[in-house]
Amino acid sequence: MNLTAIIIIAIICSMIVTLVKTFKKGDQVSKLTQAKISDYESNVEQKLIAMQERIEVLEKIVTDEKYHLNKAFSDLKD
């Protein structure tokens, strides 16, 4: 083998090693990203549940007869 062939083989081997490292690093980043997405989804679900509960309370208040009566009195005062 001449020197040129040895240099070409060394370059190819270093490229292969770099590619393998990049793919492994990509898998780790992907796992971290999935964990962040999962955390974000659970956070959004908790907020959605809290908002649904608040809406239910507000609906009960608005549909209550006393609320309508108090609003009517308030409108008469204005």
Image (spheres, helix red, strand yellow):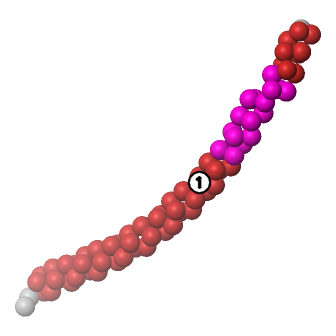
Give the magenta range: 51-68
Question: Is residue 45 rendered magenta in the image?
Answer: no
Q: Which residue is mark 1?
A: 45
Question: Residue lying furthest left in this view?
Answer: 1
Q: How many marks?
A: 1
Whether 7 is drawn above or below 62: the answer is below
Q: Is residue 46 left or right of residue 67?
A: left
Residue 4, image x, y percentages: 12, 82
Q: Is residue 61 left or right of residue 40?
A: right
Residue 62, image x, y percentages: 75, 29
- Residue at (51% x, 67% y) in the render: 35
Whether 55 is drawn above or below 19: the answer is above
- State which quadrant residue 20 falls in: bottom left
- State which quadrant residue 9 falls in: bottom left
Does residue 63 appear in the picture of this structure? yes
Whether 58 is drawn above or below 16: the answer is above
Q: Secondary structure at mark 1?
A: helix
Residue 61, image x, y percentages: 78, 33
Is the C terminus in the top left, top right, bottom left or bottom right quadrant?
Answer: top right
Does residue 18 appear in the picture of this structure? no
Crowding at label 1, few (<14), some or many (≥20) Cα neighbours within 10 Å? few
Q: Is residue 54 left or right of residue 2?
A: right
The one of 41 and 64 positioned closer to us in this rendering: 64
Question: Residue lying furthest bottom in this view?
Answer: 1
Residue type at mark 1: give it: Glu
Q: Is residue 46 left or right of residue 70?
A: left
- Residue at (22% x, 82% y) in the render: 13
Question: Residue lying furthest right in this view?
Answer: 77
Residue 67, image x, y percentages: 82, 26
The one of 28 and 11 positioned closer to us in this rendering: 28
Q: Main secondary structure of the magenta part?
A: helix
